[in-house]
Image (cartoon, grey):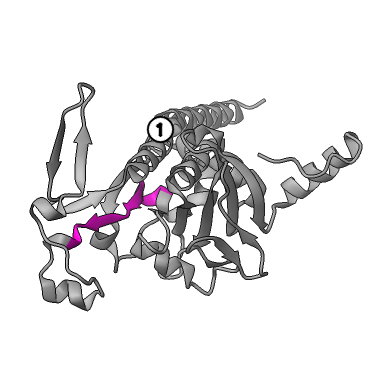
Amino acid sequence: MPASEIILAFILNLAGGIVSGMLIFLLGLRWKWISSHFSREMMAFRHVFGARAVESGAVIVTLDVYQDLRLLQHTVQDGLGVNPPQVPGPGGRRFFKVFPDGHLTAFPGAFQDLLGYCSARAASYLADSLGSVQGISVRVAPDTGVASTWDFTSINVGSSASNVKTNDVKYFPENLWLRDDIGQFTFKDDRIIAMDSRSDKGIVLKLPNPYSPGYAVLVCAGLGEWGTSGAAWYLSKHWRRFSSRFGDHAFLVAVSVTPGSDESARAILWLGEKTRYWRVRSWVRAHTFGGAGTPGL
């Protein structure tokens, strides 16, 4: 082989080695970013909470806060239909606390917003679960504080009677299932789910965000306080498998919850378009285990 060809081959091999080394070096530098954005967990997060939630790195949990009616002016209370008006003072003290030794304290009411314990539990479950995903932070906001803002993925805790954003979501045209959640869950196919003496009920509803494509809106609402927090617990534990079952499609999952135990939440109804993977999985299981049907979560 002529010397010129040997030199050319050497130069080409050297250049190829240098380029390959640089690519490997750059890949190593970006491997953490690549693995975090294309891991199985991140793909599941993207399906359920939206691709733009991954880009923004944030999910907003909105909580249903309340004001004490007695701190409003009589004219305002009258406009709300409150009659007779509630007033601070000895006759209006409805907030109290009994201590273990038997004594109690009483006060007229909160001077700002009031938050239910079930909503606090719900926020804690969601923050712990979603906050563990690399690159994702969970922020909590009062529903009234972000009522007119939609450029994010939100998980709205509370029913349409208590959370203003849940009330908006209920009337979205994209909501194909839930007609109402006051007193009982009424569905657009006339199905009804109600509380009973042994269980509260809750729903997890996910829809595409109609105002900001790429984001999602979710609702955790309940009949009874444990229905709300149980629904949030169920979402916090099973969102990865929601991705397997529904992909990035809208869905509604109803749960039954034993009062006093959010961890008792179990699914009783599934609504939404299933992924091809889940349909094949269900078919295989049904035929493998003698017609066992579609597995739950």
Spot occupied by residue 266 in the image (x, y as percentages of width and height): 61, 40
* Residue that appears at 51% across and 30% down: 20
Residue 204 or residue 272, whichever sits in front: 204
Residue furthest to the top in view is 101
Residue 147 seen: yes
Q: Which residue is mark 1?
A: 132
Label 1: few (<14), some (14–19) or many (≥20) C-alpha neighbours in 10 Å: few
Going by the picture, which residue comes out furthest to the left? Answer: 89
Q: Is residue 57 magenta?
A: yes
Which quadrant of the view contains residue 238?
top right
Is 65 located above or below residue 176 in the figure? above
Q: Name which residue lies at 50% across and 48% down.
A: 46
Measured as percent of width and height from the top left, residue 291 is found at 89, 41
Give the quadrant of residue 117.
top left
Q: Specify the amino acid type for callout 1.
A: Ser
Q: Does residue 279 appear to the left or right of 266 in the view shown?
A: right
